[in-house]
C-alpha cells in the first residue's frame, strides 16, 4: 500500500513562481489563472474595503477632526485612523505547515498587523473574501471555509457573481455535533457545555446574511463600511 505524500510549506516555497498553487491539508492544488470578470469583481471588493478601512485625510476629517496642513503629519493622521490593511491575491496566507491558501481579498485589523511579514501572512486574516468561479466553488464552500474557521477567521464573504450576492459568514462556537451553538437550541447548548471543556470545540463560520444589490452590507470589523453589493458587479454584468 502506497503511503500518501503530504507536502509542507517548505515544499510549497520551492514551487515555480510563475505557477499558482495552494497547499490544502498537505496536498498541492494548482489554481487556474482568474478570468477578467473575476478580476473586475475582485478589484471592486478591494477598492470598497480600502475606501472604508484606509480613509484619506480628507475623508477622515469629516468625522470632526481638526484642520490639518500638508506634510508628514497628514500621513500620521491617516495611519492612526485606518481600521487595518487590505490585500489581494496572489499572497500566501500560512495557516499551518500543511495549509497555505491564497484568498482573493483579505483584511487584517490594525491591531494584528504583526502577522504580515515580508514573505507571507502568518496567521488568519480577520476577514477573507472569495469570489466564486465554477472551478473553485466546491473548495471555497467546503475545505477552505473549514480551514478559515478552524484557524480563527472572524468573517468570511462568498461573493457570487452569477447570483449577484454576497454571503456573509461569521465565526461562532460549535456544539458537539459541529453546528453553530446559537443555532443548536438551548438544550443542545446545555448538553454540549456539560460534555466539553470550554474552548475544546473548533469554531464554525455560520451564515449571518445574504446581501443583494440595493441592500447595505456593514461589518463590525470595518466600522466605516456601508457597501451596496451592486457596486461589485457593475463591470461584471
Image (cartoon, grey):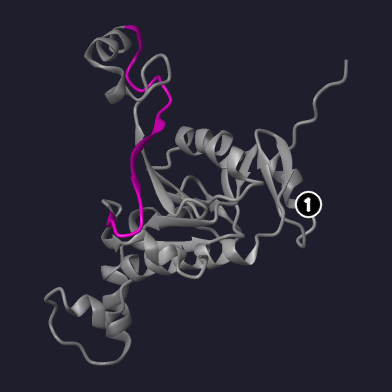
Q: Residue at x 27, y 81 (%)?
A: 57
Horizontally, residue 14 falls left or right of residue 100, namely right
Q: Is residue 178 visible?
A: yes
Q: Residue at x 25, y 83 (%)?
A: 58
Determine if the magenta segment contains residue 96: no
Residue 85 location in percent, x, y?
A: 41, 63
> Looking at the image, which residue sits at the far right?
1
Horizontally, residue 149 falls left or right of residue 15, namely left
> Looking at the image, which residue sits at the far bottom?
70
- Closest to the observer: 131 or 63? 131
Q: Is residue 96 visible?
A: no
Residue 193 location in percent, x, y?
A: 29, 12
Q: Residue at x 60, y 39 (%)?
A: 139
Residue 195 location in percent, x, y?
A: 34, 7
SS class, disc 1 = loop
Determine if the magenta segment contains residue 214: yes
Q: Which residues are drawn in magenta? A: 195-217
Circle 1 residue: 14
- Image quadrant where one finds the N terminus: top right
Amino acid at each position: 500500500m502506497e503511503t500518501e505524500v503530504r507536502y509542507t510549506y517548505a515544499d510549497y516555497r520551492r514551487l515555480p513562481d510563475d505557477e499558482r498553487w495552494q497547499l490544502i491539508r498537505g496536498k498541492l492544488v494548482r489554481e487556474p489563472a482568474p478570468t477578467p470578470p473575476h478580476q473586475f469583481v475582485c478589484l471592486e471588493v478591494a477598492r470598497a474595503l480600502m475606501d472604508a478601512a484606509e480613509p484619506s485625510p480628507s475623508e477622515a476629517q469629516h468625522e470632526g477632526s481638526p484642520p490639518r496642513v500638508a506634510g508628514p503629519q497628514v500621513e500620521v493622521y491617516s495611519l492612526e485612523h485606518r481600521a487595518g490593511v487590505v490585500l489581494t491575491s496572489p499572497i500566501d496566507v500560512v495557516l499551518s505547515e500543511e495549509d497555505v491558501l491564497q484568498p482573493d481579498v483579505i483584511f487584517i485589523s490594525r491591531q494584528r498587523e504583526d502577522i504580515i511579514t515580508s514573505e507571507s501572512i502568518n496567521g488568519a486574516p480577520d476577514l477573507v473574501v472569495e469570489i466564486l468561479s465554477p472551478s473553485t466553488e466546491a473548495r471555497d464552500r467546503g475545505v477552505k471555509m473549514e480551514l478559515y474557521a478552524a484557524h480563527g477567521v472572524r468573517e468570511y464573504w462568498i461573493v457570487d457573481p452569477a447570483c449577484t450576492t454576497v454571503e456573509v459568514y461569521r465565526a461562532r462556537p460549535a456544539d458537539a455535533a459541529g453546528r453553530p451553538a446559537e443555532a443548536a437550541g438551548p438544550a443542545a447548548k446545555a448538553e454540549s457545555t456539560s460534555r466539553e471543556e470550554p474552548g475544546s470545540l473548533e469554531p464554525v463560520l455560520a451564515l449571518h446574511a445574504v446581501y443583494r444589490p440595493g441592500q447595505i452590507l456593514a461589518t463590525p470589523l470595518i466600522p466605516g463600511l456601508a457597501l451596496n453589493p451592486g457596486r461589485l458587479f457593475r463591470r461584471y454584468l
